[in-house]
Image (cartoon, rainbow, N blue to C red):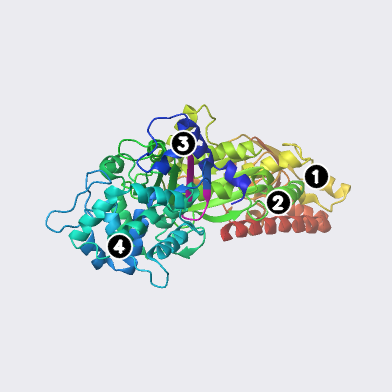
Amino acid sequence: MNEATRTASPVQALLERLHERHAGDMSGEVASYIPELATADPAWFGISMVTADGAVYEVGDTQREFTIQSISKPLTFALALETAGEETVRQHVDVEPSGEAFNSITLQPGTGRPLNPMVNAGAIATTSLITPLGFDKPIDRILNEYSAFAGRDLSVDEEVFGSENETGHRNRAIAYLLRNADVVDHEVEDVVETYFRQCSTLVTCRDLAVIAATLASTGFNPVTRERVLREDTVRNVLSVMASCGMYDSAGDWLYTVGLPAKSGVAGGIIAVLPGQLGIAVYSPPLDVHGNSVRGIKVCEDLSDELHLHVMSPARRPPPPVRVERTCLDSRSKRLRSPAEQQVLAEHGDRVKVLELQGELSFAAGELVTSSALERADHTDFAVLDFYAVRSIDLIDVPIFSHLIESYEEAGGEIAFSDVDRHPLFADDLNRHREKEGLHPVRTFADLDLALEWCEQGLIEKYGDVEADPELSLAQHGATLGMSVEEIELLSSHLEHVEFEAGDMFYGTELMPPEQMLLVTAGKISLLAKSDDGGYRRLATLSPGMTLGEVSMIAGTSLAGLPRADTAVKAWALTEGDLEVLRAKDPGLVVTLLENLLRQVAQRVGHMRADLLR
């Protein structure tokens, strides 16, 4: 994703609003029990989000390095599961929520195991299970794993490590307790040093978002496109993060935010929406539970505004954009004059049509907006078609609303077609826009009508075509190649007729079956009855087109019911008058029939292209 698209994205705008909203909140205290952490500036604040497709959004201090601290715990737990095996890991640590502080010196009665791998006791036990296996030390293997998660080489902050090593007496006490319970089999000092070093790994907020997105993507790093973990490992890790990741406030977190998460005392938080995205926030001031104050508030707002709560079941959708077209390869059923066709041929690429599909959740909405805004400055009109969409999550309401504003800021106009198939979404979207003081969404009943709107916009913007002139008979497509005398002869056998908007006139006195029309002004739609009792459009005729020539000459029924969309003017030619003309001037009739055949071929080709879409 290029920088311009990222900046214009509704997701980026949302993160910027949240950063501005919470930047002034200076509540909480920077961790001081590790002296080196106390040097952090309370004003540092970054938010980053990475989707399961690798799109990165960020604002604030997302490139500033800090130590990972307890966010290392789920990563080492994952490595232990994959190297030592789940059975061995479960013999050394349980997966039950503790309800106690992260540094509590508590083991499970009877077994002596730590309650879960997210508290210090469990994390130390998990770290003790990592063997070098090709590396010099266990920490080297751990760093290699962390680097695969982050998508870049990570290192240890030696100053923070030294600070932790000098002051980490409580963690040493926990390690000796574990050694006494036979949970830790190695030398305590070696295990504790490894644990302190893993907690002192330097990361950025963006690194943490990539790590979270890797967990969201079943262990597949969406940025490097490399697999880091097995899917079953990710499931186990996320399960423990959901129930234990936020220490003694884990229950409140799961209730309000509803995402598997992990915090660290340096001020980092990661949160994971499985199958869709990873979130990271960095802000050093902590609450009484040891969690970042701003990080908690940002995650609460994201969950609330985007409906991310994992208990609202969601799965990663298939690609939401089924096909992307322009008006060079996708036209409405309105038949156009040669002058109008020339405008569309020259400028049709300035229309973007996205036909959507499947279930639109957050990740899908983000992909749609990215596709719609790509090269937005090179298009004038865009249409999002919802015909093949099965469902739309209300999570997408602010996303699609901001998309409209972003597209219009780039100088274009956007419309939705077939969105009325999803009335809850459509109503909520318009309510949201009304609340924000924005204009309603421009909608069309189907893609065909939306395409006609795009075409008309291009013609008005780039064409030198009068809006709705009444053509003279000499300007009509049926008289191409005729001499002045032939046109005068033809006109003597024509009757001028007019229809009012809304008239369904075929088979009536206005237009009997043995008559054809040469349309000179207005629009006529050919309609077919649909299964729901309504009508669907087959084609729309403009001035210069003909109607009823095939049915009159072949003696068959008209293929569709004509309706005057506007006031219509036309010349009527009966079957009897055509025979009279044939006798008077066979050459005139040959020219007329050639022109009619040309129009029929154009209409059939137009319908064929529509069927192939």
Q: Earlier in the sequence, mark 3 or mark 4?
A: 4
Q: Residue furthest left?
A: 110
Could you tell me residue 309's position as x and y percent? 35, 44
Apparent side of residue 364 relative to residue 167 in the rendered image (left or right): right
Whether residue 53 is in magenta: the answer is yes
Query: Which residue was labeled with disc 2?
Result: 576
Query: Which residue was labeled with disc 4?
Result: 128
Query: Which residue was labeled with disc 1?
Result: 475
Query: Which residue was labeled with disc 3?
Result: 429
Q: Earlier in the sequence, mark 2 or mark 3?
A: 3
Q: Quadrant of the C terminus?
A: bottom right
Q: CA distance from mark 1 to mark 4?
A: 89 Å
Which element is circle 3 on? helix
Q: Residue furthest bottom?
A: 134
Magenta stretch, residue numbers:
40-56
Q: Residue at x 38, y 72 (%)?
A: 133
The type of residue carrying mark 2 is Gly
Which element is circle 2 on? helix
